[in-house]
Image (tube, helix red, strand yellow):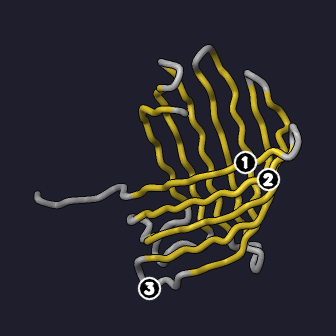
Amino acid sequence: TGQKNTTENWWRTKAKYDYFFTKKFYGYLDGRYETDKIAELDRRVIVGGGGGYQWIESENMNFSTEAGLASLYEKYEDNTDSDTQLSAQLGYNFDMKLAEGIKLIHDLTYYPSTEQFSDYYLTSTGEIRAHFTENMFLNFKAILNYDKTPAVGAGTTDTKYLFGVGYSF
């Protein structure tokens, strides 16, 4: 028919630095950059920092929680106004060994606006990772993003499913 339909045009990069003050308590700085052409999101930039606590740290399971502040900037491609706001940054990180070389990984980060608590952004990732060498792995990942105030005409919830090959350092 000659008709073309784009169903996904998204990418995200993120970086994080942790510094442990004690065996359990740490400080962190992190940043994210994201674009989603289908959701008419030209860019979302999040820069934040705070403190975390490592509740469980073992060969088979890890669990930590974090709290801090972040600057969240969103610019949309349509007529929706761009927005910069200070938000809280609350989240957790969890991973668990399911079998030899297979791991479940889950994280969630919640960014409620400090000015209007009902305005928030939430992102969560769930992953099954199977190592076939010490550093290389296959994975299946589900990503859920929820934006309480998306671009005009865009949905609030976006779910992505990814299958990939990766390398861990």
Name the quarter where the C terminus is drawn. top right
Whichever of labels 2 and 3 marks the residue nearer the N terminus, that label is: 2
At which x and y percent is residue 70?
70, 67
Question: Which residue type does callout 3 highlight?
Answer: Asn
Question: Which residue type does callout 2 highlight?
Answer: Gly
At which x and y percent is residue 79?
44, 85
At which x and y percent is residue 101?
58, 18
157 and 18: which is toward the camera: 18
Q: Which mark is residue 18?
A: 1
Question: Which residue type does callout 1 highlight?
Answer: Asp
Distance of mark 2 from mark 1, alpha carbons? 6 Å
Q: Residue furthest top?
A: 100
Whichever of labels 2 and 1 marks the residue nearer the N terminus, that label is: 1
Which residue is found at the position 20% from the left and 59% from the top?
Answer: 4
**Taking 98 as reference, is 33 left or right?**
left
Helix, strand or loop under label 1: strand
**Taking 132 as reference, is 2 left or right?**
left
Against 97, residue 65 (above or below) is below
Whichever of labels 3 and 1 marks the residue nearer the N terminus, that label is: 1
Which residue is found at the position 62% from the left and 69% from the top?
Answer: 148
Residue holding disc 2: 27
Residue holding disc 3: 79
Marks 2 & 1, CB-CB < 8 Å contact: yes
Assess disc 3: are there few (<14), some (14-19) or many (≥20) residues with their C-alpha within 10 Å of its C-alpha.
few
79 and 100: which is toward the camera: 100
Task: Determine the image quadrant of residue 103.
Answer: top right
Helix, strand or loop under label 2: strand
